[in-house]
Image: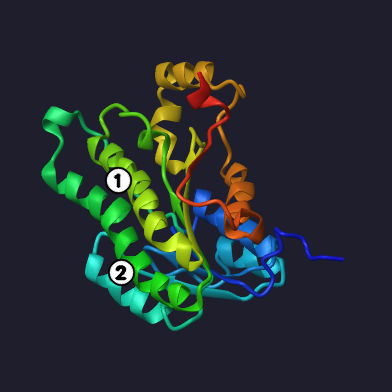
Amino acid sequence: MNASPFDLSGRTSVVTGASRGIGLSMADALAAAGADVIAVASRPLPEGSAVEQAVTAHGRRFTARHADFSDVDAVVALGEELSGLDVDILVNNAGTIERAPAAEHPLDAWRRVIDVDLTSHFALTQKLAGPMLDRGDGRVIFTASLLSFQGGITVPGYAAAKSGIAGLTRALSNEWVGRGVTVNAIAPGYIATDNTQALQDDPDRSRSILERIPAGRWGRADDLGGATVFLASAAAAYVSGIVLPVDGGWLAR
């Protein structure tokens, strides 16, 4: 009997922004499918962290690393270190958001969001994709956003960065899929995490958002697990260059 095309046994994954929320759920799902996990966070992960417990509960090997994704040089150094570890799956999930009206949006906030959400992802992917291309096998998954398709409100840097992620996904796929490395992105809808806490806490915005989601609820972080495993697996060997919404039907409205 053939193994499941979703089986990730023997694969090594890197998940950035893995300490909580969507990244934690992605790491958990990959480990449940059989992958070992190198979890990257912005600060050193304490022993027995939530992501370590999730990964080891599935009997998979766990490794912790940290880097400040607003420091591109630090991310390049991390990429150089990880490039020697035979990484099969890279999940670029680290992110931040800054909220302020566009006419008043501080340039330092803009630069930080662009560096964290776009430039550092490109820098890390460059380093880890090299060995994948040499082997002729690998998976790169970015976390995009509904704002890869829409403009949002009071988050110009985030909208620009996430639109950039969509373009980067397509550009890298064009160059790499013919060499065995697929490149895709997942666009989460409105997920109940700390990044959306300000929206959840605003009764008017929260109500207007919920009324537009056909699924009738805010998303949960674990709603992203299945899409992550799919794009990381052999089942998606002929899928590349897409931005896959996981949004409860939001974009269909």
Q: Which residue is mark 1?
A: 164
Q: Nearer the viewer, residue 87 or 104?
A: 87
Q: Which residue is mark 2?
A: 75
Image coordinates of residue 185 in percent, x first then y, are 46, 48
Q: Nearer the viewer, residue 84 or 5?
A: 5
Q: Which residue type carries mark 2?
A: Val
In the rendered image, the vertical position of residue 211 relative to residue 51, given as above or below: above
Q: Residue at x 62, y 24 (%)?
A: 215
* Label 1 Cα crowd, 10 Å radius (few <14 / some 14-19 / many 20+): some
Image coordinates of residue 113 in percent, x first then y, are 26, 48
Q: Residue at x 37, y 60 (%)?
A: 175
In the rendered image, the vertical position of residue 168 relative to residue 32, given as above or below: above
Left-right relation of 2 to 190: right
Image coordinates of residue 98 in percent, x first then y, are 27, 41
* Label 2 Cα crowd, 10 Å radius (few <14 / some 14-19 / many 20+): many
Please tell me whether mark 2 sits on a helix, a strand or a loop: helix
Q: Residue at x 60, y 47 (%)?
A: 227
Q: Mark 1 against mark 2, which lies toward the viewer?
A: 1
Please tell me whether mark 1 sits on a helix, a strand or a loop: helix
Can residue 113 be seen here? The reply is yes
Left-right relation of 101 to 227: left
Model colouring: rainbow
Left-right relation of 29 to 192: right
Q: Residue at x 61, y 50 (%)?
A: 225
Q: Which mark is residue 112?
A: none
Image coordinates of residue 195 in percent, x first then y, are 41, 41
Residue sticking out furthest to the right: 1
Q: Quadrant of the N terminus?
A: bottom right
Q: CA distance from mark 1 to mark 2?
A: 18 Å
Q: Which residue type carries mark 1?
A: Gly
The disc, 1 or 2, on the residue closer to the chain's N-terminal end is 2
Can residue 98 be seen here? The reply is no
